[in-house]
Amino acid sequence: PFQKIIRPCGSNALPGETDRMNLSTQKRKKLKSLFVSKTAIAAVAATIANGGQRRLPRAPPSANLQSNVNSQTQSVLFTLPAEIRSLVFTYALTDYEDTTLNAYGTETDYWYRPGYAGRRCTATELLRVCKRVFQETWFLQFSLAEHSLYLTQEGRAPVRALATQMSVDRMRRYLKGRRAFAHRQDGMEIPRIHHVRVFAQPWASEFPARLQELLRLPGFEPRVVTITIKYTDFLGWWNNKLLHVDARWMNKVRFPRAVEAIKMDFWMIDRRKNEIDYIAGAAVENWFFRREDGVVFAATGQDVAITRWTGSSTWANRRWIRDESRPNEIDYYTKTVTWKPDPEVKRSGPCPDLEVPDSIAREPLPNIGKISYVVPEKVAAAKVRPDASPEQVVHALTPEIGRGWCGTGRGDRLTGLPPFFLAQNEISPSLQSGASPGMNGVISNSSHRSAFTPTATLDAMSGYVGDLSGDQEKKLKELWTLLLTPTLSFLATTYGIELPPDKTSATSIFKILSEVQEPTAEAVIAAFTKAASADETTTTNGTAEPDQAAAAGASTNGAAERSSEKREAPVTNGESDTSKQEAEDISSKNVPKEKLSPLMAHLRQTDLKEGQLKSIEKILSSMSPKEMGWTLLNMVKQDNPDAVLLRFLRARKWDVSKAFSMMISNYIWRVESQVDEEILPGGELKSLKQSENKSDKNEEKKGNDFLSQLRMGKAYLHGTDRDGRPVIRVNVRIHKPGAQTEEALERYILHVIEMTRLMLKQPVETGTILFDMTGFGLSNMEFPPVKFIIQCFESNYPECLGRLLIHNAPWVFSGVWRLIRPLMDPVVASKVHFTRNINDLSNFIAPENVLKDLGGTDDWTYKYIEPGPKENDLQNDTETQNEVMTERMSIALDFILQTSAWIAETNLASEPADETTVRETKDRRADSIARLRKSYWKIDPYIRARCQMDREGAIASEAE
């Protein structure tokens, strides 16, 4: 390229000969200087980018153009084919006729020819602009980058950080080298550092001196300093003590004049976020920082930010199962407080230590005694399932107690722990005596450590049906109470029954239900009418008379004994009790808005937003009581009702109020999206009929857009993973953005998710999605459906996703993933796993369940089966449908009665019932749940259109 620039125009000599002939000594020196300087600049940039740990190399005399070149894999320009780039560069570097210097002559000259009146020159503006940008910005990255240092003990920082960043002396040499180099570049000045982050151990005695030494280094003048306290650097974290932050260091340290903001990251596990909230709040109120010039830095409540992410639970070859959010993973919760200069603040005296009081609520620990961690190799040797809970891991390893597989944190020789906190290993006393921590708080004693009987299998997961701790079961009951109490009061009001204020509590409502002998609407109405009647109930200071309370409390199997004589219907407001026909009329009519007032008043006490409240009021006022109950049943489908509520509780970290709000929001979304009113009843056959409607192009397109995705096999259900979850395979390369409307795409996604739900059977409560990225390109990428899928599994179908596998993703997907990952909730993101080949995939799905095209042994091939014209004819049999619906409503009402008895006997009674009574109530409730599941399959063909899975025979009815 340089030969072309310098060679005189018009020479007919061969390139090599003329160039060597015409290059004068001066030009050769200039060319060599230019070449060498470019190479040196590139080397300097590389040195700075690598943290300044390399000495500046001298450029060789004959440098290669390819040396020190950034491969530019992230640049859009360099994703173009080479021939396209060549065209772009050709336009930028085209040659032209330059007549400003050494013009050959004018138009009257003999040798004049258009375009050749002067020498031909190459347009080098692009190259010179790039050089100017490079010159002016090569130190900007030093200024703008966040410089992180680990002022911690060995073992508390990444190995690379220890080698390059931990030493204050190393930073001193780094700054000195940068200043010397800048001075050689015509006196160029190094811009000020913008941000420095220090990972700190505040309790370490040497920390204040080291931090002050760093801040006083010549040339070290950051504008923002962030002090990060990692959760393992809090004093006492290892033995789960209440958090404490020592303030001695901050009372000693003074910050440089250049500092404009001081931040502190309080980084802790999500389970202890209440403690971090307190620590951060106390820091805002009581802590202040000082600069060397006396300026005081203060913080306000508005200067607090929250960050969440998910990381590994293994550190120092120890898996800290005590702190896990999920197996092998910890959800982190960080509060960042920012202090800014405040001239009006006049503070004196030292800042106090920050210590969490005992009154702060803390989430319960796993039921594993005093065990804090296990050794991963021991867990692997015991062949414990990857998704086993801490309790299950402890059960599996109980025979190994005393052999160094576990510890409490206090007794560990963890690298970096101060000597005065080290002690001998401490094992849970219950485990030392041969007792193993059982599920749900049960302790299983045995004479030999290896002879124990776990109360749950490794297939179960903590917080699911059949594996609830005492606290988790209590939360479940609280959510049922929060759901049933206002709902039943509202329904009583709808039927014209005005309960006295003292009869609207959960205790009173469940006491009324205990008198219902038959699971019918008429029996429930009669019980509420009796309770509301002043003739039947005499109260004193809001409490029932003793004889009446005794009568109400006398019950058999949770239902009060009735007199053999038929009592006259109670009277309300002088009118006869609602007849069966009147009750039927009320249940079939829309609820007036005025009847919704008590319920809406109750909902306004939750954290539902005003827009959501208006939506639910509008929805409920357009529905009859029967439709409301039916919509709730449709949310449950064949699921265990407890499993449905537990999903919302797990999704909201066992916060009952938030789980209730989320459940109401889900109810609103389900009605507004018409999942049970249009998508499921219409199904694939409706789309087929739409596609055949040539008279309505809009309808025809809707049908074709939906069916085309089924026919091409964009996504389909086949097989299960190693945990028994149904697997949805998504062939991403088939998707073409814009080939179908967004409405059709979302309807298709919901259709697939709902079909997957029908495949779930206890104890399996979640599904697995396998995204096959083979052949994926940017032409297959479309963000709206991605966002919709994320929304589905975060809000609309919480805790229904067990695992998300991204298989064989090409390198181009890495950039896409960086855009998608921040959109995900940490809980959903933690379920994502990348696989490259059949070996990776086999960790999650057995090879016999992996199709051959992915390297498995399953030779099944997807083929769409077209809907039959009469496959949904049962939907037209409204008479049978109403009969089955009435039967299902009756079973659901019986479940509510059994649930109220279960809660009343164990949570609300002044004296808890004996174990036999409780066990009998639980057995009756379990039987009601089983009958409710079967009743769904009985009504399923009357309310849901048949789908591909039905035609394949994959969905098996359990009606019989």
Image (spheres, helix red, strand yellow):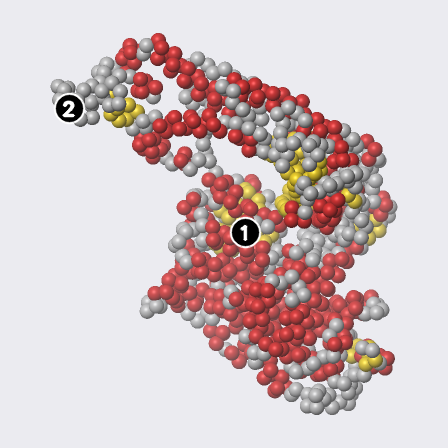
Q: Where is residue 631 in the image (x, y as percent from the top left)?
A: 58, 70
Q: How many numbered markers are drawn?
A: 2
Name the side, left or right, on which 132 lies relative to 767: left
Q: What amino acid is labelled 1 in the image?
A: Ile
Q: Which residue is drawn at 84% across and 35% down?
A: 423
Q: Which residue is drawn at 64% across and 58% down?
A: 647
Q: Position of residue 332 (x, y in %)?
A: 66, 45
Disc with the residue nearer the chain's start (2 vs 1):
2
- Pick the quarter of the image with the N terminus: top left
**Secondary structure found at label 2:** loop
- Compared with 661, 105 (above or below) is above
Residue 320 appears in the rendering = no
- Pick the quarter of the image with the C terminus: bottom right
Q: What amino acid is labelled 2 in the image?
A: Glu
Q: Which residue is drawn at 74% across and 71% down?
A: 506
Q: Position of residue 288 (x, y in %)?
A: 72, 40
Residue 338 is drawn in which quadrant? top right
**Label 2 sits on residue:** 107
Residue 658 is drawn in which quadrant? bottom right
Residue 769: image tag: 1
Cβ–Cβ below 8 Å for labels 2 and 1? no
Name the side, left or right, on which 850 lies relative to 899: left
